[in-house]
Image: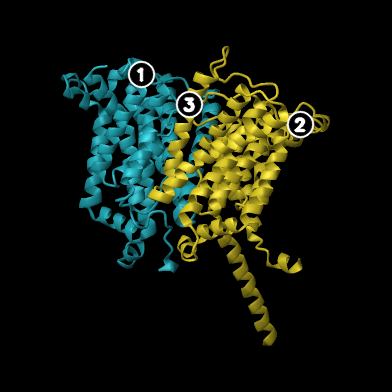
Chain colours: A cyan, B yellow
């Protein structure tokens, strides 16, 4: 594989991780752990796949069907995240457990609906292979070298990162949201509605994770199956820690893990001489997350109130 | 005894029961919404659990690994740790047991314990990794355990294909030695007579023993006392002179051992280990442990009973799919709802509180009326 091929794939693999990590950033910066990102991605991937297949059946073009699917995935992710928001914010459930439950629920619901709608354990491929170039912006996408950046998926992710940074550090909304994650009772005493802020943050994370699930499905499996997401949501969570909960650092971390993923998937063909089994390459990103966490554990700057339900009575 | 009964916190039982009933109601709504009859579905589900002695045997068989992964999660819970790594620990334990079952030749009464201990040891070591990282570097055990699940997935797949390949089927390992079983003379015949054709075996008794050992360690030993103290308040435990870090690492490792034994028993019962594409198949047994531990309030008896419930749902799901045409995944939906509801116990507590307050008001009003 040449340099361009690697670059394209790094962007392809990193995009879903980064956009989901941005979702996680909203949620965690407001003080809510969201392990449910994986499940929200599953929902997004399922909704996009199902919508695209059904619309293509009705004669719609591939790109339009995927776009409509993604819009629905964003909505579905936002709605699904309400479960986590209600359980962990209003009912003060353990946020980790609520997230795990969300993951199991998402997989169960998606597979159940797959069987009801398509009468099979997994869906048909939506046809990425034939339409690989349809994501490139016509004209601009044909420019050599920089053309790869004019993939609308890449542009979408870049816009999300910049907007996340802008909202977090240049808007009152972001300041309030961060305050809820650092010191909720102080935020409350300044008249910020902590519950409302956290709800909004979790819903935003659900919407972005829904979009990320769609991108993940487009980048890897190209259909919906139990293994379509395969830990990408957890990986996004790790990138968030790795990037110290800051938008641009998280993006850099995401690109790095995208690169690891490329090595993981194409490793055995990148270095054909080395006697390393392909499973080692597959496991590489996961092992690296652990190493990175150890290295970064000393100066971790997690939001102070992360994982603690806000209870007015405990002020 | 009466005093004990009077002091018993009934909410501990009421919340799980509420959760189970709610999950069944929502399950029924989902089934109805997809155009099937929920009553038919549930009657197929229950006849797939207790319909005849074969089904009962299969139900108990299915519950065994979930009992053990439930203990694996519960043990860590008691120390304030969240062991989401049970899937990986289970796979590593299962792989070890299968390797011992293929390469070692021994009489069964040595072979079986060796496989169980080997599986437990593999789970112990796999659980020790997040334990040590948590204790030493304060790295969150959840993220590390999740990453280790995937590492285990690829390692197990590699080991199967490389060291114990099945020449005719690349999706599973070679078969184990005839001596590598959980058949114990006497018990096997007895089980075959009561639960004909079912796969129920000696593993069930091991699981019961594990529940008893779990309860004994947690409730009756000073080690268990220390673990609970660390779980309730690490700073206080440290102040009292307990080795908090050592207890954290050991707790995760012992939790891993329970999951490893689950894998050893499960794979030995099947006589092979499968290659999985993702964290599906037997890896899901590890995630079931989380629901079971929480539903059972992290006690030995509670885990046992909740695992029977979840194992029953899983055992009956196939019948439901076959006879009522309802996809078996509804069971996954229901068990995740149970987990969600138990975790949100506050909701039910509030309902109970409101009722209690109303009752109090009523009594007061009556008193006022009497005094007037």
Which residue is found at the position 58% from the left and 49% from the top?
B74
Answer above or below: position of B254 versus B332: below
Q: Position of residue B159 (x, y in %)?
A: 50, 24
Q: CA distance from mark 2 to mark 1?
A: 46 Å
Front residue of A300 and B63: A300
Dot label at residue B109? none
Which residue is found at the position 59% from the left and 38% from the top?
B120
**Callout 3: SS:** loop
Q: Position of residue B221 (x, y in %)?
A: 63, 57
Q: Mark 3 sits on what residue? A: A225
Which one is closest to the eye, mark 2 or mark 1? 2
Q: Are marks 1 and 3 on the same chain?
A: yes
**Callout 2: SS:** loop
Q: Residues within 10 Å of mark 2 (few under 14, many from 20)?
A: some
**Chain under label 1?**
A
Of the 4 image quadrants, the one containing the N terminus of chain B is bottom right
Which one is closest to the eye, mark 2 or mark 3? 2
Left or right: where B323 falls relative to B72: right
Q: Residues within 10 Å of mark 3 (few under 14, many from 20)?
A: many
Q: Mark 1 sits on what residue? A: A268
Left or right: where B180 falls relative to B241: right
Q: CA distance from mark 1 to mark 3?
A: 25 Å
**Callout 1: SS:** helix
Q: Mark 2 sits on what residue? A: B184
Can you see residue A61?
no
Left or right: where B233 falls relative to A8: right
Which one is closest to the eye, mark 1 or mark 3? 1
Which residue ends up furthest to the bottom in the rendered image?
B372
**Chain under label 2?**
B
């Amino acid at each position: 594989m040449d340099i361009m091929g690697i670059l394209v794939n790094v962007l392809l693999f990193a995009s879903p991780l980064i956009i989901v990590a941005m979702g996680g950033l909203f949620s965690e910066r407001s003080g809510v752990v969201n392990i449910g990102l994986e499940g929200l991605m599953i929902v997004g991937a399922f909704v996009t796949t199902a919508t695209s297949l059904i619309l293509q059946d009705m004669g719609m073009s591939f790109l339009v069907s995927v776009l409509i699917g993604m819009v629905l995935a964003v909505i579905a992710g936002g709605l699904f995240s309400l479960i986590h928001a209600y359980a962990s914010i209003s009912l003060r459930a353990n946020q980790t457990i609520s997230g795990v439950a969300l993951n199991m629920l998402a997989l169960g619901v998606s597979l159940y609906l797959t069987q009801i709608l398509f009468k099979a354990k997994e869906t048909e491929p939506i046809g990425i292979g034939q339409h690989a170039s349809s994501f490139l912006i016509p004209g601009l996408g044909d420019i050599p070298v920089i053309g790869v950046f004019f993939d609308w998926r890449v542009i979408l992710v870049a816009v999300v990162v910049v907007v996340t940074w802008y909202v977090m550090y240049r808007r009152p909304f972001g300041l309030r949201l961060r305050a809820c994650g650092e010191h909720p009772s102080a935020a409350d005493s300044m008249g910020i509605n902590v519950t409302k802020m956290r709800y909004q943050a979790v819903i935003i994370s659900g919407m972005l994770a829904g979009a990320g699930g769609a991108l993940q499905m487009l980048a890897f499996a190209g259909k919906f199956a139990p293994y379509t997401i395969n830990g990408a949501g957890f990986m996004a969570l790790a990138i968030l820690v790795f990037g110290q909960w800051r938008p641009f650092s998280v993006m850099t971390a995401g690109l790095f893990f995208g690169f690891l993923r490329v090595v993981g998937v194409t490793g055995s063909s990148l270095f054909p001489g080395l006697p390393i089994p392909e499973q080692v390459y597959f496991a590489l990103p996961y092992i690296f997350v652990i190493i990175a966490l150890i290295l970064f554990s000393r100066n971790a700057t997690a939001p102070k109130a992360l994982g603690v339900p806000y209870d007015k009575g405990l002020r | 005894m009466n005093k004990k009964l009077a002091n018993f916190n009934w909410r501990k039982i009421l919340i799980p029961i509420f959760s189970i009933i709610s999950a069944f109601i929502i399950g029924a709504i989902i089934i109805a919404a997809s155009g099937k009859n929920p009553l038919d579905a549930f009657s197929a589900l229950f006849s797939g659990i207790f319909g005849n002695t074969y089904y009962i045997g299969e139900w108990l068989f299915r519950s065994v690994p979930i009992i053990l992964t439930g203990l694996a999660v519960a043990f860590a819970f008691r120390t304030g740790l969240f062991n989401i790594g049970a899937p990986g620990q289970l796979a590593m334990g299962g792989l070890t047991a299968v390797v011992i079952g293929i390469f070692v030749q021994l009489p069964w009464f040595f072979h079986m314990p060796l496989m169980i201990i080997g599986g437990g040891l593999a789970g112990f070591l796999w659980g020790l990794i997040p334990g040590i990282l948590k204790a030493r570097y304060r790295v969150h055990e959840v993220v590390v355990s999740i990453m280790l699940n995937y590492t285990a997935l690829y390692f197990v797949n590699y080991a199967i294909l490389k060291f114990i390949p099945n020449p005719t089927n690349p999706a599973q390992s070679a078969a184990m030695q005839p001596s590598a079983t959980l058949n114990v003379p006497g018990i096997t015949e007895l089980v075959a007579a009561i639960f004909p054709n079912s796969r129920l075996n000696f593993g069930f008794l091991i699981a019961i023993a594990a529940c008893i050992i779990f309860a004994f360690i947690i409730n009756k030993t000073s080690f268990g006392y220390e673990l609970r103290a660390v779980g309730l308040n690490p700073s206080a435990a440290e102040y009292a002179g307990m080795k908090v870090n050592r207890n954290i690492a050991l707790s995760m490792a012992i939790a891993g051992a329970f999951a490893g034994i689950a894998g050893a028993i499960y794979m030995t019962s099947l006589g092979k280990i499968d290659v999985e594409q993702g964290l599906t198949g037997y890896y899901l047994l590890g995630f079931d442990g989380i629901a079971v531990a929480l539903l059972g309030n992290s006690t030995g008896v509670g885990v046992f009973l909740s695992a029977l419930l979840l194992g029953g749902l899983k055992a009956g799901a196939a019948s439901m799919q076959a006879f009522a045409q309802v996809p078996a995944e509804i069971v996954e939906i229901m068990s995740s709802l149970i987990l969600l509801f138990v975790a949100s116990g506050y909701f039910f507590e509030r309902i109970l509180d409101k009722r209690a307050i109303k009752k109090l008001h009523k009594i007061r009003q009556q008193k006022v009326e009497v005094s007037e």
